[in-house]
Amino acid sequence: MNQAEMLQITIRAWLESQWILANSHIQCSLFSQQVKSWHRNLSTTCSTCSKSRGLGHKRNISEKKLTQYFVDHRKVRVIAGKGGDGISCFHSEPRKIYGGPDGGDGGDGGHIILKVDQQVKSLASLLPLYRGFNGENGGSKNCYGAAGKCIYIKVPIGTMVKENSEVVADLNQHGEEYVAVYGGAGGKGNRFFLANDNRAPVTATQGEPGEERVLSLELKTMAHAGMVGFPNAGKSSLLRAISNAKPAVAPYPFTTLNPHVGIVHYEGYEQVAVADIPGIIKGAHQNRGLGLAFLRHIERCRFLLYVLDLSVSEPWTQLQDLKYELEQYEDGLSKRPHAIIGNKFDLPQSKSNLSLLKEQVKQRVIPLSALTGENLEELLLHLKELYDDYVKIEELQRCKPMKW
Ligand SMILES: Nc1nc2c(ncn2[C@@H]2O[C@H](COP(=O)(O)OP(=O)(O)OP(=O)(O)O)[C@@H](O)[C@H]2O)c(=O)[nH]1
Ligand SMILES: [Mg+2]
């Protein structure tokens, strides 16, 4: 082998080694890309990775937006389905000319039913008009038409149904149903009219139209305890302190525009529902302020928590005014089992106001601070006592106590 051939072999070997090196580089980069894509795929499905990435917390809905979602009054027009028509026809087949009447009946129209669903929290999803399904017409060969399906309208617990301002139904239990309108009966086919004196009837009747009603649905908050107080007394702050509910809190009146319900958990899985009812003002029974709309919610509560602002002078006048408003709205409403709460006990002027309040009011007053959490235990224990008394009374009257 001469020198030139030796040089050629070395160059070829060097080129081959370079090619292998380049190839392995390409493969490596392809592999690393593959690993990256696996990682990307894995990271999207892996719960720990997604946790570490920090999913954004769902923001609380503002009170203003909540007002759009929370609807506690709706007028609906409900029209049940029409019954299907019966038909008139005669059976005929080869060698059987006079087969007799065989027109089937029409199917009944579908009802429209209000059904309580505890998942539904407001009347916002209700439409202004519901039309039921019509029944099918009857057919030849004695075929009956199919009945129209029922339409179920889901409503929240505590829905009151009124017609011409008269209460026609009060729906308080999960799963309870109220037939708002009945579907029309199906018409009769001519087979129905077959009789000894009429062997070939041609009569068939039409289906009846479905019922039609205009109903107003009103939602009354169902809770064991209802917090009643003037605006800014600290009702929402108190509800936040004793439950997981998150009503808006701000240093101006009428922050809360809708009732909020919070659940207080006790031992043995007992749950007491407490409602924060928007502020009542003097003249609320004449529809001043947020007015009658919210007195209606108080009516449903089994016992009341009067929340007074101890930082304001003469706090007993708040209690008198609140009781007066409730009494004007409904006789005996202010006398329901109740507790009197003196809030904002942490403020300096509250101490002297509390002793004055105790002189004026003979009942027990629970001083506390929703802001600092001072003396909340006393309220929670008293709330349980009120709840236990309510359950006992319901059981004595052989009624089922409301469970949340
Ligand atoms: N110092 C002090 N401030 C409180 C206490 N409780 C509530 N506040 C303040 O009082 C103001 C009104 O509180 P809210 O809880 O919004 O009062 P509310 O009764 O729900 O008011 P409306 O929703 O308007 O009816 C807020 O600025 C609270 O921070 C308390 O115990 N101590
Ligand atoms: Mg409030």
Image (cartoon, rainbow, N blue to C red):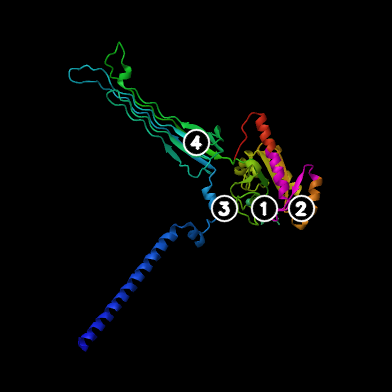
Which circle's residue, 4 or 1, is located before the other in the chain? Answer: 4
User: Dot 4: what SS?
Assistant: strand
What's the distance in space between the residues labelled 2 and 1, CA to CA?
A: 14 Å
The amino acid beneath tag 3 is Glu
Residue 83 image-quadrant placement: top left
Residue at the far bottom: name it.
Answer: 3
Q: Residue 219, position in %: x, y?
A: 56, 40
Q: Residue 198, position in %: x, y?
A: 29, 13
Residue marked by disc 4: 115
Q: Is residue 276 visible?
A: no
Residue marked by disc 3: 63
What's the distance in space between the residues labelled 3 and 2, CA to CA?
A: 30 Å
* The magenta segment: 360-387
Q: Is residue 281 magenta?
A: no
The answer as to whether callout 1 falls within 8 Å of ligand 1 is yes
Select label 3 or label 2 by which is in front. 3
Residue marked by disc 1: 232
Asked if the residues shown at circle 4 and circle 1 are in contact, with their CB atoms under 8 angstroms apart, the answer is no
